[in-house]
Image (cartoon, rainbow, N blue to C red):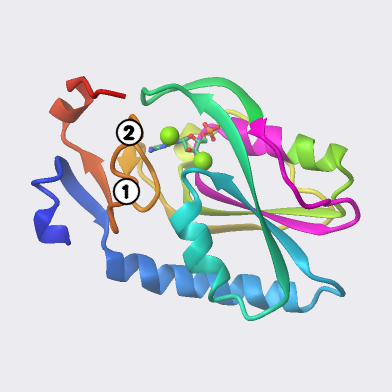
Amino acid sequence: MVSEAANAGIDRVLWTEAEIATRVAEVASELAADISRLAEPAVVVGVATGAFLFLADLVRRVDAPLTVDLVRVESYGDGTESSGRPRVTADLKVDVAGKHVVVVEDIVDTGNTVSCLIAHLQKKGALSISVCTFLDKPARRTVDFQLVGGGKFYRGFECPDSFVVGYGMDYAELYRNLPYVGVLKPEMYSKKTDN
Ligand code: 5GP
Ligand code: MG
Ligand code: MG
């Protein structure tokens, strides 16, 4: 609950649980309309771990046939800056060759992760690649990734240039369970955690 945000070390809440639910439902309708026009089920690929709540909320609102799989792409250590060299550290189980793929991300920041994933999925023969991200931080983009085969870019909210946590997103593997998105109090970054 947002009234407890201060106790969780949150400086300011950017989107409440209710605001997130409303927006996710809108994005889901847009996605559902596009997916239901396809000749065969789309493959929705969530990027672990950050996208797990968005993925869960999104797909249960898409009333169209689809497959769900997960991929893990890592570039961050425990800090707030990307190393800039993402790697696929856990691959898909589903075969995406000849399939319409929708990558579901928590946040597109520099664009490195999405760019790496698009290349990875293209190598596997995906027919089209769309990206559906909960947050988009265009101010920090350094990689101009290209969607494939008429794929679309869907986004929940445009995010200011601050490091955010909650609704799946972590700092040092904490805060993913917060139902809202917020900016941490500066003193939380310097606190050492046990993991
Ligand atoms: P990119 O490769 O686009 O720079 O970053 C992509 C990934 O970095 C995101 O999917 C997310 O996992 C992580 N990331 C980027 N910005 C933030 C942020 O503000 N907060 C958190 N918790 N993770 C972020
Ligand atoms: Mg991510
Ligand atoms: Mg992270």
Q: Is mark 2 within 8 Å of ligand 1?
A: yes
Count the labels in the image. Answer: 2
Residue 33: horizontal and vertical position, in percent?
A: 67, 78
Identify the magenta region. Answer: 89-117
| Front residue of 98 and 151 | 98
Q: Residue at x 38, y 70 (%)?
A: 21
Instruction: Kindly identify which residue carries mark 1.
Output: 166
Left or right of 146 on screen, residue 183: left
Give, as a three-letter code, the residue at label 1.
Gly
Residue 148: horizontal and vertical position, in percent?
A: 80, 49
Query: Is 102 inside the magenta-drawn segment?
Result: yes
The answer to whether residue 166 shows anywhere in this view is: yes
Q: Residue at x 69, y 32 (%)?
A: 116
Q: Secondary structure at mark 1?
A: loop
Residue neighbourhood size for the residue with mark 2, other residues' Cα within 10 Å, grouped as few (<14), some (14–19), many (≥20): some
Q: Residue at x 56, y 29 (%)?
A: 74
Instruction: Kindly identify which residue carries mark 2.
Output: 171
Q: Secondary structure at mark 2?
A: loop
